[in-house]
Amino acid sequence: MKRLGVLLALLVLGSLLTVGTGTVRAETTGYVLIHLKNPDWVFNTTALNSIDWNDQGIGNISWSLVDDKTLRIDTPALVDFLKLFAPPGYSTSKSAHAPSRTILDDILNRISTAGAVVDTTLGSTVTVTLNDVILSNSYGYGSVKVTVLGQDTYNGEDYSVTVNVTGTAYVFGWRNNRGTVTVDGNDVSSSFCPNPYSPVTLSEGLHTISTATGATNADGYTTIVFSIIALQGSNYTVSGKLEHSNYEVMYTFERLEFSVAFNLKDALTGQPLSGVTVKEGSTVLGTLDDGGSLELAKGTHTLTFEKSGYWSVTKTIDVENDTSLSVEMYPSSAAFKLENFPADISIPENTIYTLTFTLSPIQTSATHNTYLSISGLQNLISVKKGDSVISPENGKYYLGDISSPVQVSITFQAGAVGQHGFTLSIESHDALMSNTYTTTKSVTYTVEPLPFSIQMPSEWQVGQNELRISESSGQSYLVTVVLKDSQGNEVWSDSHSFNPYEAYTFTPKIPSEGSYTLELTWNGKTAIYSVQVNPAITLKTKTLSVKKGSEGMIILHFKNPSSDVQYYTIKVSGGFLPAEINQSISVAPATEKDVSIAFAVPEKLTYDAYELNVQVLQGNATVFSDKVAVSISEGSGFSLFGGGSSGGKTLYYALGALVVLGLFIAAARRR
């Protein structure tokens, strides 16, 4: 049982370690857990209550049962007493460990005497883990983390620990020249006695540190105490074995103060802040820059952050569970916080995205007559305050007086792949409209490629078109394709369930020329594309002037963007035409051409203007119809093209006159 005295040596070391200059000390406290291993034994609460724990000037020992087989003894009352018996290098005393051992021996003896346990025979195994504490600069290694292990090794027993090091660690310590210390089987005893300043380096990986007893001193035991230290930034775990039969004795250090790091940023620009004062109540804890830290006691703290030119911020932190805190501070020129704002915005190309955030007043006296302005955002669709759509007024959106948090939503369509951004500006006033406050937020977002590639027609046409989609992300999902007209009415739709890397061809059917919207929906996202269907047939001759008795001509333009020959029948009727004109044509694939339809104009007409009906059929379906306005003039005058009988006579008279004139000139030359 006396061998349990080693536990107090460990607690002694942990309680005496301090940090270097300029750092708040990380306080520690310790406790011991005594666990009964015999399944038939339990601790007797009545017996434990009957024990007089006061002795040797240590005061009352605090104890509690973790369960009926585990007793916890808290050691804060022992710390000051145990400091007197620390090993060299930790106090001025060179005393042996007998008093420390006697204290634990006495505790266990009292438990046994009270009948809480039946047997105190020694000998089995327990795993020991210590938390980090901090080593003093006095050892010359700077500010380092340390885990301390120590042992009073009795004659005939050895002690061993395993250390898993990440980074670099060192072992150093002292012994009383009667035992040996080995690291990975190598005897390092000369580094341990008598000078504790000669460390043995532990490289990254697993190491075994063992002690072996030598000759005992007058009290019958050998003392070996050693420490394992790791440089800042290294991580390590320590485990070991203690030999007991009926007890598992575990010990630990609990840190009462923790280093808390603070991320201090401007809430609108995201830029780091410096010179921020941190208070708890009226007590100033320090002034920090972004990334700075404070040592705070374990527990809940309500902290206030202050900086000139910024609104103060209050945050609550649970120290131990939380070792970092992010604080965003708003300039005092701003009247609103933009809360619940997404940190990273990624949008698939051409999809609709709604940016939603909470607009919270910092000071309600400064949030009257509020306007929202949005600059640099293409394809803005709508702005909402709560569930209400807001119409723009001279490019601004009126939000009114805001006295409590409101939700604002901005819906827009993403553009091309790449990095994009826009700016939100929220302008508000005090009740008298004498002061203006402006909250400006830069928004950046990334437009990512779609998970599939799209091959659209080079030119959309009336009738059937081909739209090919190829899955390129290696996923499976359903794609729905919807074609809507300019009024938002669905005119065609289809869907396909894609397997990874599958390609599929949709065949949208367009009823007529005009503007359409193509929507591709998958996984709750919708990409939108504009579709313009230009007329395949246009009437180039909308108006025409002809003379009585002459001929007229109507010209139509045909375009065929498809890969098939297109066949049409052209019909012209009405007006002064005695019968309907029919003409069949064809248009080769991916070509366009003009087609002329000639007609005769009678010499005798009643009116000076007529309308001719032009109709184009494809099969039995009419695909084009329009009207030509024809103006009629008298048939007098010279006409080389077309015309009736009077026009023809004029031409003959003119030709005869030219012949006579030519004969006259020829006769004159012969003379």
Image: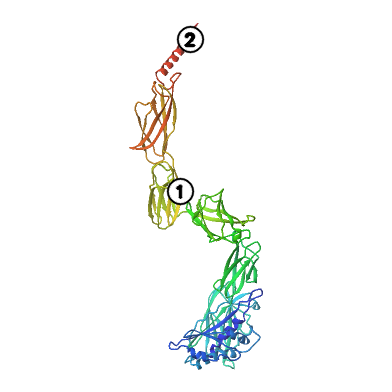
Q: Can residue 181 be seen in this view?
A: yes
Kind of residue at badge 2: Ala
Residue 19's disc number: none
The kind of secondary structure element at disc 2 is: helix
Q: Where is residue 454 in the image (x, y as percent from the top left)?
A: 43, 50
Please rate how many residues cluster around mark 2, counting C-alpha atoms within 10 Å: few if below 14, some from 14 to 19, many from 20.
few
Residue indicated by mark 2: 666
Q: Can residue 343 be seen in this view?
A: no
Mark-to-mark CA distance, 1 and 2: 77 Å
Q: Hey, which residue is sitting farthest top in the picture?
A: 671
| In the rendered image, the vertical position of residue 653 relative to residue 625, given as above or below | above
Kind of residue at badge 1: Tyr
Residue indicated by mark 1: 529
The kind of secondary structure element at disc 1 is: strand
Residue placed most toward the observer, 439 or 147: 439
Q: Position of residue 489 (x, y in %)?
A: 41, 47
Q: In this view, does 514 lie to the left or right of 181?
A: left
